Amino acid sequence: MRKFLPSLLCACIASSAPGCGHMTESRVVHRFAESIKEHDLARMKKESSNDFESKAVKGDDTFSALKMIDLPEGMPKVVSVKDIKGDDDKEVIKKRVTTIVGKDKHKLYFTLIPDGKSGKWVVDDMFLSKDDIENNKSIATRLAVLLNLQESLAAWKAGSREQIIAAATPEFGEAMSSLTQGQVANFAHKVTADLADTTKIQGDERIGDETAELSIAKMNADLVMRFRRDGQRWLLDDVAVKSRRPGEDIASARLVAAAMSTALKFDAAYRTSDKRALQQLCTNGFFDGSLAAADLAQVQLPGNNGPVLTDFDVKLDGTRATFVVRSGQEELTLSLKQQQIQRLHETPRFLVDEVTIYDLASSQDKRLSSLFTAQATMEAFSAALAAGDIEALARNSTHDFNERVWKHATAAHLSGLPTARLPAVRPQIVATRFKGSLTEIILEQGDTPVTYLLRDEGGRILVDDLLTPASGWPESMKSTAEILVPIVGFTMALHQSNMDLVRGNSSSDFSRYAWNHFQRAPRFDVDPNTFFKMPLAEINRAEDTAEVLFGNKRHGARFMVVKERGQFLVDDVVLITGILEDQQIPMKRTIRTRLAEGD
């Protein structure tokens, strides 16, 4: 801190000597300035108002706090005094004293008021500039904030849980009180690591009537401390670390502490299979969909006695938090969701909505939601497929699988799907692979190898596809079925003379040129059903079109399929009676020609 000069020369020998008309104010300002220079706490109290003392005078810490304020160098010299009168416009109740300090004549402003008991004038506040006066950014307020800053910094450097809570707002203190002394000490070390021995306040301090924010230089980072006023006292409301190295930020110590608390409570409850506690610590979707009916003993979390907090990390991203702790060759990650705050300054609350165990050796992500529900979902889907239960298939399938297949299918369609004709036996699991939100279950169903692909959708693990060996068409059941379902529907509807369903499974072009002209199925020179009953030979699929062959090049049917409004539909059918061109009968063109001829 720059020091006031040791003396104030106010020679009143001649009337031209500046300051001689303000002897009272000069003496008050001089004595107050000397108390700062001499670190004379008793004298400072004597020369200051009760309000200034209650705000800013807290023992010898006051002088160490003053060192952080960039006071101008030199002793203040009074240049003007403005009397401020009360409502009766008679009695002077306050004086605004303007002084100059040092060779640069930096202005320093004092507010004096009469002491309530003695009536003598004392210092009520100081301001470094006129802007500070207008914004009520006084030295007393700064000192009050800095005093708590010193107290809070000392507590965080020491890692003392009790001292940290004592210097914090009730809400911040509540968040920290949910952690043990050891957990607080580890967290405090992460926050205060690389702090310089001498506290240096950055120049972008923001101090208002109710809140304040100060930045302190760290190595490769800034420690941001946020305060809130509680009466005359300022309390630490949050701490952040703004790092100049990627990935080392701490956006909010209060949020991190709340997330840590939930994560550690979850870990303890899970290890003891305390489902009542877990229900309070998890989102409804995660608990009901994954943990409620699960045997938790089947899946052990890394670490025999809980996470070792010497190597942990908590990341915040909007309303989400991620708690990561490593144990040997495994990494435990808890994903947490912040709950909606109901009132101002409320202590934040997080709930766990996913837990992932990452195996560093195999590079596999094992999600608890997948581990506990994937097998049950797969077995339910397999049973529904064997029973032809479309509703059960839809319940156990993802939205995409439903939209592309089951929404358009009935039990009658299943017989036309080669991938649906699996042996009606209980599947035997060969291996399970975890890839984030995707789970692959490789099994044998009878002699047929099948791979189930399951995805996390809204907290539920659902079947997204089945892969079975195939040479003439895609291995994917979803890709094959979304093409075959409209073909099967078309052929059944035409055989039943249900023209609404024929049009429902046909493209707009096919319906316009052919099916819109019929109330019942027309009579053909050859029966199409004998061609449609031929076995599936191949599917050649592009992105939005496909060509499907039933039978062979001498006898069968070739379907052209196109995608309209997100759904595949039959666009034409060629009946094959031989290999020659005139033995290929395109249904769309033939019907259109015959209609034009009046047939």
Image (tube, rainbow, N blue to C red):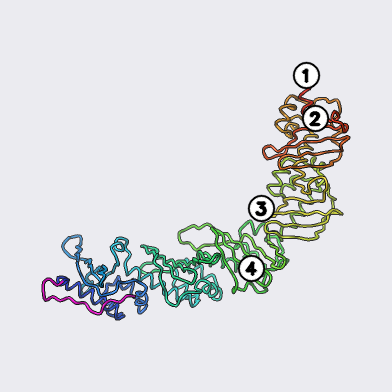
10 Å neighbourhood of mark 4: few (<14), some, or many (≥20)? some
Quick one: label 4 or label 1, which is nearer the N terminus? Answer: 4
Crowd tier of the residue under label 1, counting other residues whose Cα lies within 10 Å: few below 14, some 14–19, many 20 or above? few
Q: Quadrant of residue 573?
A: top right
Distance from disc 3 to disc 4, alpha carbons, whole Å, reads: 25 Å
3 vs 4, front mark: 3
Q: Earlier in the sequence, mark 3 or mark 1?
A: 3
Q: Is residue 502 left or right of residue 73?
A: right
Q: Mark on residue 269?
A: 4
The kind of residue tagged 3 is Glu
> What residue is pinned by disc 1?
597
The quarter of the picture where residue 434 lies is bottom right
Q: In this view, does 123 lie to the left or right of 420?
A: left
Question: Is residue 388 one of those drawn in magenta?
Answer: no
Label 4–label 2 contact, CB within 8 A? no
Mark 3 to mark 1: distance in Å?
55 Å
Numbered badge on residue 457: 3
Outermost residue toward the left in this view: 14
* Residue for badge 2: 586
- As drawn, 400 above or below 431: above
Disc 4 or 2, which lies upstream in sequence? 4
Magenta span dominant secondary structure: loop
Range of residues picked out in magenta: 1-17
Task: Say left or right for 321 vs 427.
Answer: left
CA separation, marks 2 and 3?
43 Å
Measuring from the top left, give residue 379's x and y in whole percent.
77, 54
* Secondary structure beneath label 3: strand
